[in-house]
Image (tube, rainbow, N blue to C red):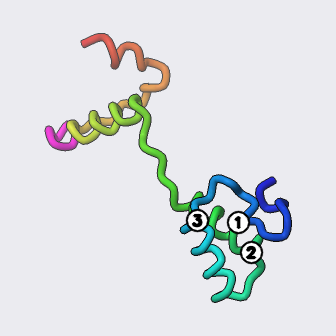
Amino acid sequence: MLLALGSCAARSVPLLAQQTREQLEQIVRITGKPEKTVLHEVVTNSLKTYHKAPSKSAKAVLNLIEWAEQEHITGKATDVSTNYNMYAWEE
């Protein structure tokens, strides 16, 4: 576990750049919180704000939705989950 690495957690993580370590140490000094707490908060908050790029299939669906909105195509297909093959391949 990352947070259980010695007394100085940021220095114990070899993948952190020197600048990142210095920023963490500065936050520790400013807030007065233990380094483990600061490191945990930084990682947790970063994960909350991280947005994964959509996969190719999700991007294709988003592009299709955008196209349909531009072409003013509307409708209410209520049986898509059972007849998806018909909608995808038949005219």
Nearer-the-camera pick, 52 or 25: 25
Q: Is residue 8 above or below residue 86?
A: below
Q: Amino acid at mark 2?
A: Glu
Can you identify the residue that label 2 sits on? 35
User: What residue do we see at 62% from left, 68% from top?
Assistant: 21
Which amino acid type is marked by label 3?
A: Gln
The label shown at residue 10 is 1
Q: At label 1, which amino acid type do we have?
A: Ala
In the image shown, does 18 or 45 lie closer to the viewer?
18
Q: Is residue 61 left or right of residue 46?
A: left
Whether the residues at callouts 2 and 1 have beta carbons within 8 Å, the answer is yes
**Distance between the Cα atoms at labels 3 and 2?**
15 Å
Task: Give above or below for 42 relative to 71.
Answer: below
Neighbours of disc 2 within 10 Å: few (<14), some (14-19), many (20+): many
Query: Dot 1: within a 10 Å radius of its alpha carbon, few (fewer than 14), some, or many (20 or more) residues?
Result: many
The answer to whether residue 32 is magenta is no
Name the mark nearer the viewer: 3 or 1. 3
Name the secondary structure under disc 1.
helix
Q: Which mark is residue 89?
A: none
Label 2 and label 1: CA atoms lie apart by 7 Å
Disc number placed over residue 18 in the picture, else none: 3
Q: Main secondary structure of the magenta part?
A: loop
- Magenta range: 69-73
- The quarter of the picture where residue 73 lies is top left
